[in-house]
Image (spheres, rainbow, N blue to C red):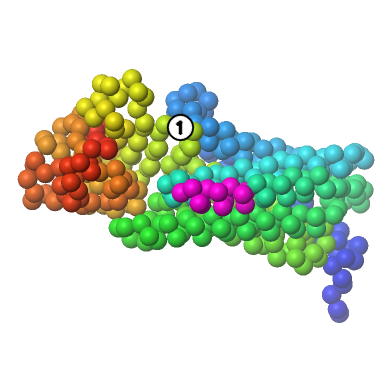
Amino acid sequence: MAFASWKDPETVFLCARAFEFIVAFAFGVYIWEFLITLPFDFQFFLRKRPFRWTFVAYALTRYLMLLALIAAIRMSNVLTPVNCTTWNRIVYTCAHACFALASLLLFLRVVAISDRNIYIILFLGAFYLANLGTLIHGATLSRAIFVPELWLCGATNTVASRVNVWMSFGFDLACLAIMLTVLLRAPGGGLWRLLVNQGTIYFIVATLSYLLPAIFLALDLNDAMNEIPQTISLVTMVICASRMYRTLSTFDPTSDTRTFVGSGLVLTLPTLSTETRRHSRMPSAPSTQFNFGHNPHLGHGHGRESLGVGLTFARAMDEKIGDEFPIPMKHRGMLVPSDSSSSQGTSIAEKAGMTPSASREVFVKIADVS
């Protein structure tokens, strides 16, 4: 028996029923993810963590995703006729906002890793604005009708999302390619560990999640089949982008602080105000601070671990908490293994082969955060 056309009403009904199950499953998965990660949100709400504007994008991504799924559940359980187009636009507006905000989190990650390379920012910034335009346009074209046989609101004209899905896929793919290029050029460390530490695994999964809806929208089997992979893609994208934000560094282009987080090492690069600089040993220099975590090797001058982020801790004069000593700014981000056999008086600048004048841009301060 030959398979019926994908546009056949009976086939469309079966696909719509499958879509209902997918929405319920996605809602369950996301509720679980949302609840187990709420403590992180409360740390910001209760001001236990310093507020950064990137948290706004992170929070909106999570809570708009929750709202979109709640509205989708409502559309899947309609006992009496309602204005389905209005409900569908709520779903699409929240969903497309989640796509845009999740892509923004990935974009900021690339900007941080590339050390604010102006060409990368301009290229990806223009790409992102174009992507944002297609997402807004796609949300305005969404329509839905009441299907009494299935007690749901079924979306129509879903093929209109084709352009914005392809654009989002292209943008995230460009971000991933740039991120991998930058990381592969970074010195030191095993490639796999470097990718894990920089959140590239989440990045790859988030980007590839677009592949399924891009293929189905190109095939355009029917409206229900177009919706199923988009729902899966959206939930996957939001979970991966938000997890990457929580587990990796926070990067705030408007802040005076750059923070890179690695296993057992946190490096903060705040820019001192003019008044603070007058009291600094090096008036023209920003302050670089080392915070040593739970890795016992990182507090004793034997840090040989290469994480692809931050700086290697070399021996200070006497390795006491609060000691400050110079480090060349241009070596920021490059790990220089310490040598336990060297004299205690050897500075990082000398170990890096820098002249004294080149090392006056930054100094480091040892702090204990264990």
The image shows residue 182 at horizontal and vertical percentages of 42, 57
Evaluate whether residue 26 shows in this view. Answer: no
Query: At 57% across and 51% down in the image, what residue appears?
Result: 124
* Image quarter in which the N terminus is found: bottom right
Out of 111 and 67, give the one closest to the viewer. Answer: 111
Outermost residue toward the front in this view: 357
Whether residue 312 is in magenta: the answer is no
Read off the residue under disc 1.
Answer: 255
Describe residue 129's horizontal placement relative to residue 112 as left or right. Answer: right
Magenta residues span 117-128
Query: At 8% across and 51% down in the image, what residue appears?
Result: 341
Describe residue 137's horizontal placement relative to residue 235 as left or right. Answer: right
The image shows residue 251 at horizontal and vertical percentages of 46, 39
The image shows residue 39 at horizontal and vertical percentages of 50, 32
Describe residue 359's horizontal placement relative to residue 27 as left or right. Answer: left
Tag 1 secondary structure: loop
Whether residue 127 is in magenta: the answer is yes
* Image quarter in which the C terminus is found: top left
Query: At 39% across and 38% down in the image, what residue appears?
Result: 259
When asked about the image quadrant of residue 274, the answer is top left
The image shows residue 99 at horizontal and vertical percentages of 65, 47
Residue 250 lies, with reference to residue 178, above or below; the image says above
Query: At 42% across and 31% down in the image, what residue appears?
Result: 256
Judged by its main secondary structure, the magenta piece is helix
Residue 53 lies, with reference to residue 227, above or below; the image says above
When asked about the image quadrant of residue 313, the answer is top left
Describe residue 221's horizontal placement relative to residue 264 as left or right. Answer: right
Out of 88 and 313, give the one closest to the viewer. Answer: 313
Out of 103 and 134, give the one closest to the viewer. Answer: 134
